[in-house]
Image: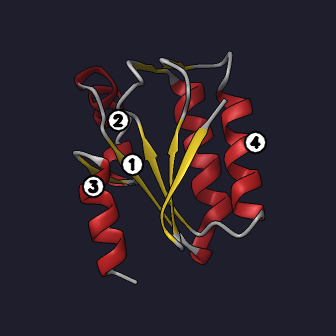
Amino acid sequence: MIHTKTHDPNITVIRPGAERLTAVNAKAFKDEVTDLINGGATQLIVDFKDVSFLDSSGLGALVGVLKKIGHRGELSISGLSSDVQQMFRICRMDRVFTVYDDVNSAVQSMAESQ
């Protein structure tokens, strides 16, 4: 389901691979990202540029991934559409996650912080 791309030996960009991240696919998304973390990925960027809708299950999956990565690494978000960005704001997830306008900004910031 997810699509990944490594920008740097340590930075992995994840695209959910679905237009909607909901109860239907949130668990599969979380499981696949958890597998990446278990495999050693520590600097993750989830790129939502192709995601037009996110529900509470999708947010819950992201929070689960954030808990899994813990202090071992970093999880950032990029490319939120206006609807998904509004969901982040309503649920105050914009205070939990570092959100970037696009992948390049997120990669640059993450690379500078290493």
Q: Is residue 50 above or below residue 92?
A: above
- Horizontal side of residue 94 vs 69, given as left or right: left
Label 3 belongs to which residue? 104
Label 1 belongs to which residue? 77
Q: Quadrant of residue 24?
A: top right
Say which of marks 2 and 3 sits in front. Answer: 3
Q: CA distance from mark 3 to mark 4?
A: 25 Å
Q: Earlier in the sequence, mark 3 or mark 1?
A: 1
Q: Is residue 6 above or below residue 103?
A: below
Say which of marks 2 and 1 sits in front. Answer: 1
Q: Earlier in the sequence, mark 2 or mark 3?
A: 2
The residue type indicated by label 3 comes to: Asn
Q: CA distance from mark 1 to mark 4?
A: 18 Å
Q: CA distance from mark 3 to mark 1?
A: 11 Å
Q: Earlier in the sequence, mark 2 or mark 1?
A: 1
Label 4 belongs to which residue? 31
